[in-house]
Image (spheres, helix red, strand yellow):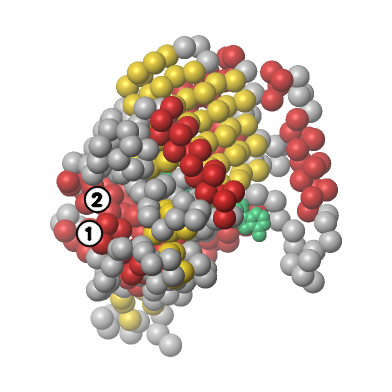
Amino acid sequence: VRRQDGRTTKTMAEPSTMVPVAVLQGFIAEIFTAAGCDAAEGKQVAHHLLSANLTGHDSHGVIRTPRYIQWLQEGKVRAGQSLTVVHDTPTHAIVDGNYGLGQTIGPLAVDLGIAKAREHGLAVIGLRNSGHIGRIGDWGERAAAQGLISIHFVNVQAGELVAPFGGVDRRFSTNPVCIGVPTKEGPIILDFATSLVAEGKVLVASNGGKPVPAGSLIEPDGQLSVDPRTLYGEIAGSHVRDSAKGAGALRAFGEHKGSGLAFMCEILAGCLTGGGTSGPIPGGKRSRIANGMLSIYLSPGSFGAAQFEDAAREYAGYVKASRPAEQGVEVLIPGEPESRIRAERLAKGIPLQPDTWAAICATARGLGLTPPAVAVPNG
Ligand code: NAD
């Protein structure tokens, strides 16, 4: 569209287009508010989706908006929910997220763990039936901000996508693990899916983004693949991807080791929380995607480790001082890539693929909203 000032305005971002953080955050909040959240919840969902984009995990960022809205409209997740405490002791609890939005339920479950661990030195919280809780690093950061170490094992009920080591049939979800450690210079956050890539990275690739690494997917006949169609079936234009339509699976990282970790996430986040595993066991086939999360919170001071944060930082410095394997490529510690990308994106904005932006705008229009124009200077 030619504007009066001679610049071109596009409602679709080019791959190199940076969408300012405040514009994107406001737009996403508006979409969720139009879909039934109150203003505070809309803002909180937008905050956590943007947090994933800001840390470079675009797979768990605003790209999820069309799918979350579809789930809200289908009643698979619900606005305005809170926790039901199913089992409670001073140090541990099982809580049910009532299929509320994960960006609402996640903070409530983490804050319960923080409160118990601050009082008793340690706590364990089993969360079940939560809407998608997105980037788990957010929860490690939330606990670290209160001076706590935290360990999170996550699964996705009805989210079978990953073949076990040696198999081709889907048996696990992408089952992330996160360990967060507080230090005075900022948290150290290890946070990754136990699949070779998170499903969202296949989603990003299917929208014209970065291709997934070799061997990320496996066809039913055992052939390795990088083609998003292995997971989603035929892909036409920008629409909500459906992993039920693909015949293949994601693969676990690290061969038998990653596959074993994924298995244990099902046991801890699925069986122990009572939410169920990603497959039909126990309880038959479910159609509703929900996260389970078993979280352990430790207060270093109550372990007599008064100098813990200094010791952790000192050790991180020692690790970083390893001579690089490749000239000029620095050794990084967990969480370092994310904090660097965050600083860069806060300053420059968030890059979005055209199809991602188009799908978000289509969702907004479906709710009666007008997407903000993204201005691309001529030339
Ligand atoms: P990834 O492969 O990018 O790994 C990220 C981790 O590796 C981070 O801790 C990062 O600091 C560290 N790291 C990256 N490069 C490094 C380097 N060069 N040196 C040292 N450390 C480095 O992450 P992923 O597996 O693609 O997961 C992406 C996100 O998806 C995570 O935030 C995860 O929580 C989320 N996820 C969520 C769900 C869910 O159901 N809610 C499911 C799967 C994944």
Q: Image check: 45 left or right of 362? A: right
Residue 131 sits in quarter = top left
> Residue 47 has which mark?
none
Give the image location of residue 250, x and y in percent.
43, 59
The amino acid type of the residue labelled 1 equals: Thr
Query: How would you rate the neighbour count of disc 2 (Cα within 10 Å): few for under 14, some for 14-19, many for 20 or more?
Result: many
Tell me how far mark 2 sits from mark 1, CA to CA. 8 Å
Q: Image check: 276 left or right of 185? A: left
Residue located at (33% from left, 37% from top): 281
**Which residue is the site of mark 2?**
69
Residue located at (69% from left, 25% from top): 300
Q: Is residue 173 above or below residue 223?
A: above
Q: How many marks?
A: 2
> Residue 363 has which mark?
1
Whether residue 138 is visible = no
Quick one: 294 or 136, which is closer to the camera?
A: 294
| Quadrant housing the N terminus | bottom left
Q: Image check: 51 left or right of 180? A: left
Query: How would you rate the neighbour count of disc 1 (Cα within 10 Å): few for under 14, some for 14-19, many for 20 or more?
Result: many
Q: Who comes first in sequence, dot 2 or dot 1?
A: 2
Give the image location of residue 106, x and y in percent.
41, 35
Quick one: 104 or 329, which is closer to the camera?
A: 329
Residue located at (61% from left, 46% from top): 190
